[in-house]
Image (cartoon, rainbow, N blue to C red):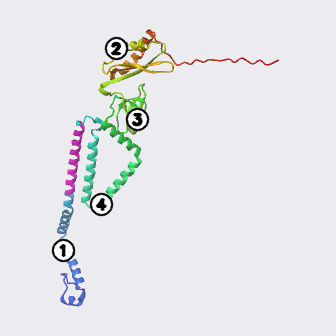
Amino acid sequence: MPSPTGRLSYPERHQTGGSCGYSLLVTLETTAQLNRNEHPIRTNLELLTDYLLTYGISVVGAIATLITGYLVAGWLNRLIDRTMRRARRIDPVFHHLPGKIVRVIVLIFTLIAVLNRFGVETTSLIALLGAAGLAIGLALQGTLSNVAAGVMILMFRPFKIGDAVQLEGQVYIIDALGFFICKGHLPEGPIVFMPNSKIWGQTIVNLSVTDQDIRRIDESYTISYGDNINVALAILSQIAAAELRIIAEPAPLIKVQSLGENSVNILFRVWTSRTDWWDTKLDLIQRCKEGLEQGGCTIPFPQREVHVFHENAIKPEA
């Protein structure tokens, strides 16, 4: 038996022989237990100190990393916002999005770095986030294609709000731009919602933006073969010269275009301001038709002549 002091006497050590090491271990554990019982407050303070030394640096580093990441994310967000506002070709709807995306990315990496300081296995977490992102992307493939097309529309701005756009032969007036759809209306009034992927995947004709802000009027007028061509050309030239909305340069082009089956076709090509194009076009159609008729020209219309031949009936022999 050990003595009250926790030490083995010489006979006891001699009796134990080869088990002296084990007895020494028991003695040390007993001594440590007695010390803890005698000084519980000091033991708790030592444990607290050990915990602080072990985890304190990690906690302080994690807090510093979190604060730094938060400040850097906010600074990058503001910097990108200011840069986007100075870009005139980018739609205002798109100004805040890049900054927010960068801020979220920085905060995610900051959180991963904080978890890594506490010994959390971040490799599996990153793989899990990647797999989740891939699954979400496949599930929302059509929606994400609209978002991608919306970003391209907002960046390159092939049209803006209020423009008249021709898509697949149909004219739309744009009312609102978005990341998923564009809202517009037909010239006759009905509201139209167009997916961005459908818009970006085809040829876009912006009728509200033209070269040098002018637009050409192309019309074709017909006269009969019996009419005087020079008279018809003179009438149309006078009408073009009298119209103040027709610009002098490029010069009007009024020439015989082709010879049709029932008429002589005359090309009437003039230029006008983009904003005056529609009204000028409609007014010229009426004036040219009335002018040709007053000048003695006839405007033929498609017609066919049908000749019926009656064969003599064969009389039967008596």
For marks 2 and 1 on the same chain, the one whose residue lies earlier in the sequence: 1
Badge nearest the viewer, 3 or 2: 2
Segment colored magenta: 61-85
Q: Amino acid at mark 3?
A: Met
Residue 179 in the image, given as x and y percentages of width and height: 35, 39
**Residue type pointed to by label 1:** Asn
In the rendered image, residue 269, in percent from the top left (x then y), is placed at 38, 21
Where is the N terminus found, in terms of image quarters? bottom left
| Residues at discs 2 and 4 in contact (Cβ within 8 Å) | no
The residue singled out by tag 3 in the image is: 194
Tell me the chief SS of the magenta region.
helix
Dot 4 or dot 1: first in sequence order is: 1
Residue 181, given in percent of the width and then of the height, sits at 38, 37
Q: Which mark is residue 241?
A: 2
Quadrant of the drawing holding the C terminus: top right
Per the image, the residue denoted by label 4 is: 121
Report the Cα–Cα distance between label 4 and label 3: 45 Å
Q: Farthest front residue?
A: 317
Q: Is residue 307 magenta?
A: no
Task: Find residue 24 and name its label.
Answer: none
Total numbered badges shown on the rendered structure: 4
